[in-house]
Image (cartoon, rainbow, N blue to C red):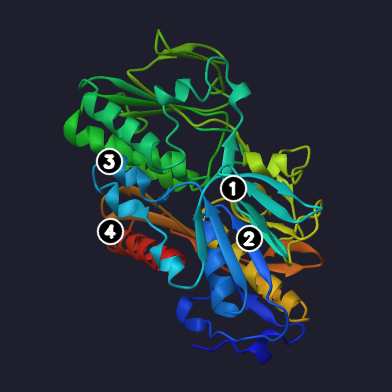
Amino acid sequence: MCKLTRRKFLGLGGTVLAATSVAGVAPFAIGGARKTVVVVGGGIGGATAAKYLRMMDPSIDVTLIEANTNYYTCFMSNEVLAGERSMESIRFGYSGLKGHGIHVVQDRATSIDPDKRVVRTQGGQRFAYDRCIVSPGVDFRWDSIEGYDARVAERIPHAWKAGPQTLILRNQLRAMRDGGTVLIAPPANPYRCPPAPYDRVSQIAHYLKRHKPRSKIIILDPKDRFSKFDLFLDGWKRYYGYGTDDSMITWVSGAAGGTIESLDVKAMTIQADIESFKGDVINIIPPQKAGWIAFSAGLTNEQGWCPVDFRTFESTIQRKIHVIGDSSQASPMPKGGYVANTTAKVCAAAIVADFNGGKAPRPSWINSCYSTLAPGDAISAVTIYTYRDGRIVKVEGSGGLTPQEFDAGMRAREAQYAHSWFNNITADVFD
């Protein structure tokens, strides 16, 4: 594996493959005044950026501000719902980052002053910065579904931010009678991790098949097609009778009236375009937007996301502030954990280059996304992107999708790769 040296890194026109592993980065020190970076948000994007800044240049003073003591990964949280994984297995602390010399501040960032270059926190602390990296994940458009808001979500969980919401949904599934109905309502695009609602359907169906086989799942979807569409439908046919009179899963597309309009919590009923649906357990994944602090700092556009320079992920609205992960507007890359990880590395490399008087390397990005149809049967999609003429473009002929034709051996390997991917990325971020 090629080592990244300061001389190579600062070479003009260099390229950074943002999937760079821990072992592939050798630190280099710089002279001059000590630079300061404040990272807001300790999820996959923020934690990765903080760690890679310190690995690329240990002279940089890095502070990570995160309100929570632990982070729960959204990826693999659907396995918790299925009873195939514990909550503890998706929980990660910040001791590993502290070992890299990062100042981890357990507090909530409440404001960013782009002019004075200061971040303030709920606890009254104040952090000056040369560069600020904002990685707040997503927030929800609570006004989009009548009767559904943050308060109601404590009873009707979205479970789209892993942690307590995951446990609420898991416990409701366990308490549901055999023969009950689970309503799942994915959002319209764009949202975090496009295949995840359908991975969730598969995982819950697997749980119900084992424990409550007379139960049903109804998907109320505003879309007419979704990520890995044919592979999911094929898997649902194989395991859950999809398309038959005895199917455990019913998918109502947008064209068929799947867009939901309102929720009646007391009646446990969703009103969709054409008819209403009653559920014993309801899981609504609301439409999404950038995290609230991105709005507070004036980083968002009229679409509710943060436009950035794709070479550096510096905001095109506020200078010296970079936005990475789900809140950034980085199409055609989807929103999700691996993209947050890969954009964080590009951002860190650009900042280090700038501090050293160099030019941001020309970036490439990779995204891998695994989904489970049933234990031992997983599918994946991989895409590689590059930077061209100010845009992010897919590298022609790169990546791929699991073949449609079922091969049990290949699918079993995909399931192993999925769990290996989880172990690798969490070690890359938090160790």
Tell me which numbered mark, 2 or 3, is placed earlier along the sequence: 2
Q: Is residue 356 above or below residue 79?
A: below
Q: Which mark is residue 368?
A: none
Density class for disc 3 (Cα within 10 Å; few <14, some 14-19, many ≥20) is many
Question: In this orientation, which residue lies closer to the viewer: 381 or 307?
Answer: 307
Q: Quote the CA–CA distance across marks 2 and 1.
A: 13 Å
Residue 56 image position (x, y, % from top left) = 59, 79
Upstream in sequence: badge 1 or badge 3: 3
Nearer the observer, 81 or 296? 296
Crowdedness near tag 2: few (<14), some (14–19) or many (≥20) residues, C-alpha within 10 Å: many
Which quadrant of the rendered structure holds the C terminus? bottom left
Residue 59's spot in the image, x, y percent? Answer: 61, 79
Q: Callout 2: helix, strand or loop?
A: strand
**On screen, 182 above or below 330?**
above
Q: Is residue 88 above or below residue 260?
A: below
Label 1 Cα neighbours within 10 Å, binned few <14 / some 14-19 / many ≥20: many
SS category of the residue bearing label 4: helix
Residue 410 image offset from top left, x and y in percent: 33, 63
Residue 382 appears in the rendering: no
- Find residue 38 and name its label: 2
> On the rendered structure, is 7 left or right of 244?
right
Name the residue located 39 percent from the left edge and 34 percent from the top edge.
Answer: 165
N-term-proximal mark, 1 vs 4: 1
Going by the numbered disc 2, the residue's amino acid type is Val
Which residue has dot 3 on it? 82
Q: Nearer the viewer, residue 296 or 103?
A: 103
Q: Nearer the viewer, mark 1 or mark 3?
A: 1
Q: Residue under circle 1?
A: 136
Q: Give me the C-alpha separation between circle 1 and circle 3.
A: 28 Å
Q: CA distance from mark 2 to mark 4?
A: 47 Å
Q: Residue furthest left?
A: 211
